[in-house]
Image: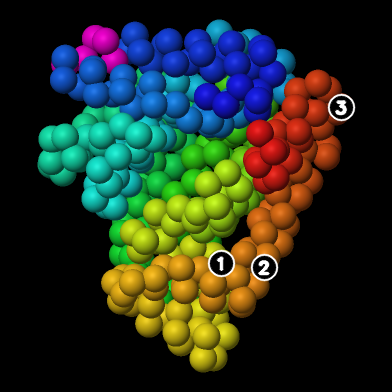
Amino acid sequence: MNTKLYTPLLQKEIKEVESYIQKRFEKSNYRLSDNFLAILNAGGKRIRPAFVFLSGELFGEKKRDLLRFAAAIEMIHMSTLVHDDIIDHAEERRGKQTLNAKFGNPWALYAGNYLFAEALELIQPEKNKEIAKVMADSAVKIVEGELLQHLALFNTNQTIRDYLKRIRGKTALLLALSCQVGAMAAGQSPEKVKKMYNFGYNLGMAFQIIDDILDIEENAKTKKTKGEDLLNGHINLPALIALKDKDKLSGELDAIIKSKFSNENSFARGIEIIKDKEGINRAKEIAFRYSEKAKSFLSDFKESPVKKELIRITDSLYERNF
């Protein structure tokens, strides 16, 4: 968890989510328990449980009633990380060995599915039918997004619209669900729930675009470009913008990506082309529009410390000033 991003109160609530999940894992099979705890303890921003709390508290819902829902959504997120690592053949995540690297893809796949099932069980569908339904519906779309992500690897023929559809399932839907569930837990009207859903959705789109930009921007501390996602075949928005013009530079970038960056210095050359074609700057403009649109869905709600916090975190996630 990034302590600079959240207030002390929200940090405390997120730590309670982590503790709640940890206790849940400790009751599972010993091998599952140890490895799930490793994923949990590897860190992360915990923005999904944070937005469950903030969305519920915007309408006066108490923390106790939001804790279980926040934990469930974080577990769904954890399951998608496991599935992503399988797709990417990743050996490490945040400096820790991945489940697929330790035990193979079949075991990791079942472990990811187990996390998904545990999350849905946490919701207690018999008591929370509407929340269980929206979570189940979102789960289907999230899995669809994971499949689209796999099918799109190294595909330079995909459109910007294809990319936006893909990140909708990869990131935006789960953030939208976090805000939706928080509002639903607070017993809000369908209209207000929809506004919170749209807030989370647009923020999620902005967040993923910025994440993709950060993957290929030079790190100020190391002076190096990481590029893990692009090297694994996830063609991001800056690259797609650079490919769009169909000119000489675009053709060169197309060939580099199709070669899977096999030639020496081809990745550095690809990034150079993306920058020359203004791919990063134009992608930032699109992310900014999504971020501003997200905040517009909060405009009808009365001013409060929680609303200010939602806006502050939205700006921070776009600017990455933490």
Question: What amino acid is labelled 1 in the image?
Answer: Pro
In percent of width and height, residue 116 lies at: 31, 32
Residue at horizontal 65%, vertical 28%? Answer: 5
Foreground label between 3 and 2 = 2
Question: Residue sitting at 51 percent across and 79 percent down?
Answer: 243
Residue type at the position of mark 2 = Arg
Q: The magenta stretch spans which residues?
A: 25-29
Q: Could you give the CA–CA distance between mark 3 and mark 1, rounded to whole angstroms?
A: 36 Å
**Percent position (x, y) of residue 177?**
53, 37
Q: Mark 2 sits on what residue?
A: 282
| Numbered badge on residue 303 | 3
Q: Amino acid at mark 3?
A: Glu
**Alpha-carbon neighbours of circle 1 within 10 Å: few (<14), some, or many (≥20)?**
many
Decide: is 127 above or below 98: above
Q: Residue at x 51, y 91 (%)?
A: 248
Q: CA distance from mark 3 to mark 2?
A: 33 Å
Query: Is residue 112 on the magenta stretch?
Result: no
Q: Nearer the viewer, mark 3 or mark 1?
A: 1
Q: Is residue 43 left or right of residue 211?
A: left
Counting residues from the N terminus, which is met first, the one under dot 3 or under dot 2?
A: 2
Read off the residue under disc 1. Answer: 238
Q: Are dots 2 and 1 in contact, CB under 8 Å?
A: yes
Q: Nearer the viewer, residue 187 or 27?
A: 27
Disc 2 secondary structure class: helix
